[in-house]
Image (cartoon, rainbow, N blue to C red):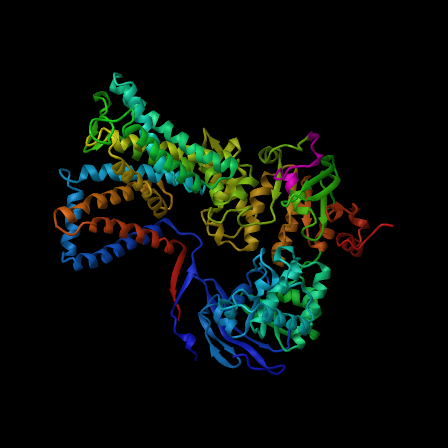
Amino acid sequence: MHREVGRGEAILEVRGLTKIYPGGVVALDNVDLEFKSGEIHAILGENGAGKTTLMNILFGVLQPDRGEIYVHGRKVRFRSPLDAINMGIGMVHQQRKLIPAHTVLENIILGHPEAGKILDFKKVRRDIEELCRKYGFKIDLDARVWQLSAGEQQLVEILRALYRGAKILILDEPTSVLTPLETEAFLTSLKSMSRQEIALVPFVTHKLPEVFAISDRVTILRRGKVVKRIETKDATMKALAEHMVGKEVLFVLSKPKVSIGGEILKVENLSAMNDKGLLALKNVSFTIREGEIFGIAGVSGNGQQELAEVLAGLRRVETGRIIFMGRDITNASVLERLKMGIGYIPSERLGVGVIGGFSLAENILMSLYFDKEFVNRGLLNYKKIREYAEKVISEFEVVAPSINTKAAYLSGGNLQRLVLSRVIPKTSKLLIANLPTTGLDIAATEYVRKRLLECKEKGMGVLLISDDLDEVLQISDKIAPIYEGRFVSILQAEEAQKEVVGAMMTGAYSER
Amino acid sequence: MTSLETLKLKLERVPVVSGGQAVRISLLSLVFSFIIFSIFLSIEGANPIDAYSNIFSFALDPNLGLPTTLHRGLFLLFSTLAFVVAYSARLWNVGMEGQFYLGTIGAFAVAYSLPELHPAILIPLMLLAGAIFGAGYGALAGFLRGKLNVNEVVGCLMLNNIAFWLVYLLTVGGPWAGIAESTSRPLPPNAHAPIISYTPFTSYLAIGIAIVLYIFLSKSVVGYKIRVLGNSPTAAQHIGINAPRTYILVMTIGGAIAGLSGYHMWAGDPAFLMIPRPEAYKAIGDLTYWGLIIGLVCLLNPVAAIPTSVFIGSIMMGSTVLVRRLRLPFGLDVLFLGLVSITFAAFQFFYMYKVRRMK
């Protein structure tokens, strides 16, 4: 099945691809695409542009309602991903499909047709080592997957696809979880694969610069349609972004002038453990004042999550104190903190921020159920709750047929609006926003940032945790780069230079 | 065109199943099980239509099967409610069996030790003791889960076994042993409960509890907390819901409801008024597991569980005519019940997936 192909030959082609979901949502509308060997062909689009649907159709997870798929010019129909894999299509998921407790080698051979029979580990190892040499990958085949960094795990997925004979690799948001250093290495390996006549198809929502750096061709999807096909060398980043959102993009939000007021939160020498029982947050001290956005910039996994959880009351404090409005709340419960006016926007939306099986009103209730105004002798006052929910949902522009709609039916940006509409109106003093824009499209990202700035205008303190450096620089008043559980520094926004903060959060900066 | 063209069906995940769809799917599953059972009836030489009409006319005849249909059906309702309240927090209460035995012990202990009390005091006291004994037993499994993170299924099953032998110790040659072999001695006359239109008053109690539970789960703050915890323990933690305490609470409520069924089963039905032989009370204990099936089929809706439980009760009662009246082989009645339960469970699949034809 895997015949040798020359460079530039079309490996995979789709024509007239259309997918309509129950309920009439047109996810893909007559999409034609062609993927050639040795070419990096990026697919760009916002959330809801149809990228996920397209990816799922190319990998056999979903079937199109209309349209044809051709592999090497032969018309095919994928019943399941297995058919797609057998046709030489590989997929690298954003959410890794690996078994953490198994070794790299075991993960690579998992699901391989030969693996059901007697395993010749020596031969497999030789083959994979050969693959690594060919593409210039460096990885310890005997390491267990949980010990690997995000970038290395991605490599394992790529190796698994290649070992199964993939001639075309679909990459879902490939750089979203990588550190800058890993990203660089990853881009290099993509280049080397494309030289080996593999077609690469990265799907990208944000992080446009990286697309720019490596791709040969870009196709932009919007609302299920191809709106632009362009050779990368002829494109500008601004033009790509414009095509993605379909309007002039505001890359700069104006920060309102707000006078900084009294102290809301004072954190002294705070330390906390992570889930593995290792010290993840080390001796952090800072204050947040009224009308101030305190931004924490860092690569995921450097103690930000633990800091957010400690402040929200979800994690135990090892040492140090938390003073809120002059009161020691170091050991206060989650509920006490909520009642004091501390709001928390969790990094995970579905399942933590909101519950999919609950209606919008029931989700809003998560921030009301302890409020006497909505409770009458232990029973919920649904009339008041509904009125309130209608109000906040229209205020935060959550798009849904009614407040009885289940949250599971909302898309990413809408879900986050729902979370904001639940948390922000019930927050009076301090808002902790943990990765509030991660995974959102440009329009939704802008919306969330505007809302955070509004909180500041109202005199709240905001703690913003973000892995998007531009975001932190843009809307914060103070910036603390975090690295390995410590604040490297606390900078005033005006004096913070992007290169310096970037170096600080990756550990590349040392004050001498 | 390749050979990959053959398959024409495709499964799609359904995010949330609605009540109306659940009713349709459940009815469809019933029709399906009736059709399958018709095949067995035909093989045995019976006319399926004749058999079904016999089953239901017997089960619903006030002079024949109706009292038992209601009694058993509402016994199942107790088990279902005990399961539903715990499963709303996503705890698998499979301890209804043990809680039922404990409820039996509680109720009978009161009756044996205070036989002279006036019925108006004695009977409520028996119910109360049954509920408390069941609640305590449920709370034990809830405590193990909530505080010590012992899986509730394992905890419940072990406690069930202990409870079975506790009843055995008390009845078979124990302090409660009766004159007849291996049963307990009869209840004192003051403990005899009134029958209201064919069925013990506790049947109405079960229906009342179902309605109260419905309101509790859908309209009360505590019910809301239970449902948040059941849907997402992480979300519950983020909004300050105490998970261990809630786990203990749901198992306590569930245990109390299952405990009441101990009174309903043995003290409520004039056919018993004692604890029967171990095989007999174990057979009824096994019926409590229907609570899982009914609870899940009804999407945890306590009110929907009322007719469903009675319906299953009618099949339990009615299918006995296959052997007694139609002279069909032994075991066919049990087969019917098994088929209904297995198709009910299998059709749960359609609560989660939709089959779509590929063009």
A3 is higher (above) or lower (below) than B80: below
Please identify the residue farthest to the front as the structure is shown. B173
The spot of residue A354 in percent (x, y) is: 53, 46
Residue bounds of the magenta highlight? A309-327
Q: What residue is at 15 percent from the left and 44 percent from the top?
A: B58
Camera-side residue of A504 and B171: B171
Quick one: A142 or B307, which is closer to the camera? Answer: A142
* B38, above or below B61, in the image: below
Residue B153 appearing in the image: yes
The structure residue drawn at horizontal position 32% and vertical position 54%, both measured from the top left corner, is B25
Task: Examine the structure image and report whether residue A352 is included in the region drawn in magenta.
Answer: no
Q: Left or right of A62: which side holds B58?
A: left
Residue at the image position 58 percent from the left and 73 percent from the top? A168
Eyeballing the image, is B155 above or below B47?
A: above
Expressed as whole percent of the image width and height from the top left, the position of residue B143 reads 48, 34
The magenta stretch spans residue A310: yes
